[in-house]
Amino acid sequence: MVSTVIPVQPFDLVIFGGTGDLARRKIFPSLYRRMAVGQMPTDARIVGAARSEMDVKAFRKTVSEALDEFVDPKVLKPEVVKNFLNCIEYVQIDAKGTNGWPELKKLLNERSDSIRAFYLSVAPSLFEDIATRLSKSGIATPDSRIVVEKPLGHDLESAVALNRSLSQSFCEQQIYRIDHYLGKETVQNLMAIRFANALFEPLWNARHVEHIQITVAETVGVEGRGAYYDKSGAMRDMVQNHMMQLLCLTAMEPPARFEPDAVRDEKLKVIRALDPLSASDTVRGQYRATGDEGSYLDHVGDPSSRTESFVALRCHISNWRWAGTPFYLRTGKKLGARLSEIVVTFKHPPHTIFPQVDAQKGNALIIRLQPDEGITMRVTIKDPGPGGMRLIEVPLDMTFADALGEEAGVMPEAYERLIMDVIRGDQTLFMRGDEVEAAWAWTDPIIKLWSESSVRPLPYDPKTGGPIESYKLTGAEGHLWREISA
Ligand code: NAP
C-alpha cells in the first residue's frame, strides 16, 4: 500500500528553544523525515532561536548531530540531510530581552509571502514574553501561527491566565496547542473507525458498551525529572491532557463535519458532561523501591511527598449516550509494560445459548497507541476441530505494521503530522483554549481534595498494574482491568 504525500507550501518555522531537548529529539527529526518523503519543500526555512551564542554553521552541526542520534539510519540520506541543513538558520535571541529581535525580523522579511509559524519549545514562563514581542515587533503577521506545548497551566486559574496572555497577541485561529497523542495514527483511526464505518456507531453507547478503559502505562520512574514531576503528578501530567483527549475522542458525538471547531465542540461537550469525581472514584499510588532502584519518594528526594506516580479513576459521563457506562482511566510510572490503549468492552448477548463463555470477557475493541499501533477486535468463535461446541476467544488483529507492510516503517510520528498540520493551517488535532480550561475545571477539585486529605497515595510494587486497590475500583462494578503486559 503506498500513501500519497502532498507537499506543503513553503514556510518559515521559528523554533524558540531550538537548542533544547524537545527540538533535538522530536522537532528537527520530524521535519527531516517530512523532507525525506517529499512533504517539506527544500525552500522552507527553519530558524532555531535561543540565547546560546553560536553562528549558523555551529547550529547546523548541532542539528546534524540530532539527526544522527534520533533519525533511523535507514532514512538518513546524505543528499536529503544536506538539503535539510541548508534550510536551517539560527538567531541568537533573548525571549525576555531586546537582543536578537531585529535580526529575526530582518531574516523573516527577506521573503514575506511564505507561511510563518512560531514554535514555542521553551518553558511556559516565556510564552507571554515571546508572544508579546512577536506581535509588538510586527514579526507575527495576521496569518502567522503560534505553537505551544504542555504544560498549558497547572490549574484552571493559570490556564485561563495563559490563554488570556496568548490571546492578547494571537487570535484563537492562530494558536496551536499541541497534545502529541492527538497526532498518533491510531487516535485518528479511532475517529475513522467510529465515523467512517456503519458497523460500530450503532453499538457505541451505554446500551451496548459495558465499560471503557483507557490505560497509559510507563515502565520508567521519574528519575532525573523528579523535582519537576513532584510538582505535577500523574493527574496533571497525563490525565488532564493526553488521557482527557483520548476520552473525548472515544466518547464524543459524531461531529457534523470533520472540521476543527466541529470536532472540538463535540470534545468540549464530553468534558462538560463528566460527573465531578469523588475520592471513592480515585486510587492514587507511589511506586516502591525494588532491588537497587529507589522508590518514588527516593527519586523526588522528599519522604513526605504526596504526589501520585499512579492514578486510577472511575468516571461517568452524564449524557444520553453514556449514562451508566463507567470509563476507567489509569496511568502510572514503573508499571508492568510501556503501553497505551483504549479498550471498549461490549455487553454480553442478551441471551446466551453457550453458557461456557467466560463471564469476564466478551467482545472488545482494543485500540493500541503504543507499542505497535493497531486495533484488535476480540471475538468469540468455535474452537476448530471435532471436539464439540467449545468456544474460544480470538483477536481479529489490525496491527498497522501487518496491514501496511513496509509502509508502516515510515508511518509518520505524531510530531510530523502535527507540524505539517500547523503549516497547512488545520487545527483539528489541536486543543482549543476552552477545552484546556474545561479539563482543568474537572481535574482541579479532585486535586484540591487530595491535597487537603490526610490520606497518602498507596505504595505499589514496580512492574505490576499499580496498587491492588485500583482493581477494587473496577471490581466493585464487576469489571476487570486488562493486564498491563508487553
Ligand atoms: P530544554 O531542553 O530546557 O530547552 C529549553 C530551550 O529554551 C533551550 O533551547 C534554551 O536555550 C531556550 N531558552 C531558555 N531561556 C530562553 C530565553 N530567555 N530566551 C530564548 N530561549 C531560551 O526544554 P525542553 O525539554 O526542550 O522543553 C521545552 C518545552 O517543551 C517545555 O515547556 C517542556 O515542558 C515542553 N515539553 C518538552 C518535552 C520533551 O520531551 N522534552 C515534551 C513535552 C513538552 P538557551 O539556553 O540557549 O537559551
Image: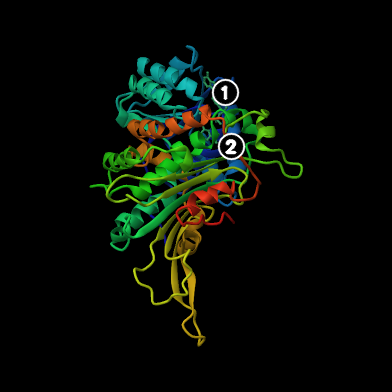
Residue closest to the far left: 256
Quarter of the image that includes the N terminus: bottom left
**Is residue 7 shown left or right of residue 280?**
left
Q: Position of residue 130 (x, y in %)?
A: 44, 20
Q: Is residue 44 above or below residue 403?
A: above
Q: Position of residue 268 (x, y in %)?
A: 32, 38
Q: Is residue 104 above or below residue 300?
A: above
Q: Residue at x 29, y 43 (%)?
A: 266
Residue type at the position of mark 2 = Pro
Q: Foreground mark, 2 or 1?
A: 2
Circle nearer the N terminus (2, 1): 1
- SS for callout 1: loop
Dot 2: within a 10 Å radius of its alpha carbon, few (fewer than 14), some, or many (20 or more) residues? Answer: many
For label 2, the residue is: 457
Q: Quick check: can you spot residue 6?
A: no
Residue under label 1:
55
Q: Which mark is residue 443?
A: none
Give the CA separation, mark 2 to mark 1. 49 Å
Instruction: Looking at the picture, tell me which residue is in the foreground, 169 or 316.
Output: 316
Q: Secondary structure at mark 2?
A: loop
Residue 91: give x, y in percent of width and height.
Answer: 50, 22
Q: Quadrant of ligand 1?
A: top right
